[in-house]
Image (spheres, helix red, strand yellow):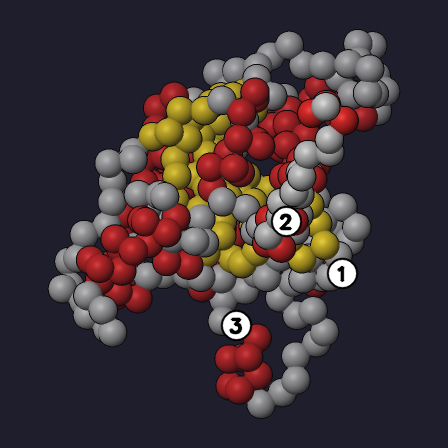
Amino acid sequence: MSWFRKKNQRIEAVPADERRVKTEGQFVKCPECEAALFKRDLEESLQVCPHCSHHFRLDARSRLAILYDEAKYEELDAEVVSSDPLNFVDTKPYPQRLEQARRASGLPEAVINARGKIGGYAVLTAAMDFTFMGGSMGSAVGEKITRLIERAIAERAAVITVSQSGGARMQEGTLALMQMAKVSAALALLGEAHLPFISVLTDPTTGGVTASFASLGDIIIAEPKALIGFAGPRVIEQTIRQKLPKDFQRAEFLLDHGMIDAVVDRREMRDFLIKSLNFMVNPEAQTRAIQGETTGTNGSGSTALEVKSLESEV
């Protein structure tokens, strides 16, 4: 009878490449401690290694999402992009380099301007992105940051810049160098308007960006172990023919020598910025809170300020 007969059932062999667990692209190796990090875990820790706290470089849009309330912000001045005023050609024409940078980074320029709220305060932020031609500052970058500052003055808002740059853009020559003075002059007007300017330095911040607006903040903050300087350490050693100190031009070295005000972990950066804005907008209230003279707290020991506008000047 047919139901007693064993059917010849063959087990199909699964190809070796299908048997392997698909892990390619799921892990990232930490360059500091060499730990294998699950990509999703790294994203949840804001691109900071959970083992050694190494700070991976962060793109501009991710940075803005971390800083703004509910990750909501309005992008500004996206139409301002670089042209080719000098018809510059090195190994490639400059317009070709710009197009490649836009495709690789997904950005129109090396800086993104944004408007939103941080801790309830109106804040305009310029976040630079190293993936776009090394975050270099050309005429478009300088124009965007200058527009941001002028808009902040008109709207009575605070300004935050997040620097991540190799310096002035060589393909634009003197026009790029002019942006150093241009942005610095705009910041002088911001200071006259008594509006806060916080400069955040990330890895790397070098060249003309360091020599201009990045070093002009009312408060200057850096991420841990960020490279910060004008010329690179190798260039300096070759010029002065001396060995530089260990960790020269790193954030901690600059903090020890009074060049910056604080080194802040990325995971604590937003809270630090909110506390800084609290103090800069209403310093007397914050001083009383520190001295324990105020009564109302927000549960963390600091005063919960009701004033969330910069309409009242410091």
Q: Residue furthest front?
A: 1
Q: Earlier in the sequence, mark 3 or mark 2?
A: 2
Q: Which residue is depicted at the point 13% across and 64% down?
A: 87
In depth, the one of 247 and 33 nearer the eye is 33
Q: Earlier in the sequence, mark 3 or mark 1?
A: 1
> Where does the image place residue 62, in percent across and percent down from the top left?
52, 37
C-beta proximity under 8 Å, tags 1 and 2: no
> Where does the image place residue 297, in percent across and percent down from the top left?
80, 13
Disc 3 to disc 2, how far (Cα)? 57 Å
Vertical placement of 239 versus 251: above or below?
below
Residue at mark 2: 13
Crowdedness near tag 1: few (<14), some (14–19) or many (≥20) residues, C-alpha within 10 Å? few
Q: Which residue is depicted at the point 23% across and 73% down?
A: 90
Vertical placement of 227 versus 108: above or below?
below
Residue 122 is at least partly visible in this image? yes
Instruction: Identify the amino acid type marked 2.
Output: Ala
What label does residue 284 carry, if any?
none
Question: The residue tagged with tag 2: helix, strand or loop?
Answer: loop
Q: Which residue is depicted at the point 54% across and 46% down?
A: 58
Residue at mark 1: 33
Residue at mark 3: 232
Instruction: Identify the amino acid type marked 1.
Output: Cys
Crowdedness near tag 3: few (<14), some (14–19) or many (≥20) residues, C-alpha within 10 Å? some
Disc 3 to disc 1, how far (Cα)? 24 Å
User: Is 211 positioned to the left or the right of 66 in the image?
Assistant: left
Instruction: Identify the amino acid type marked 3.
Output: Gly
Residue 256 is at least partly visible in this image? no
> Where does the image place residue 249, in percent across and percent down from the top left?
62, 66
In depth, the one of 207 and 307 nearer the eye is 207
Q: Which residue is depicted at the point 19% across and 66% down?
A: 93
Q: Earlier in the sequence, mark 1 or mark 2?
A: 2
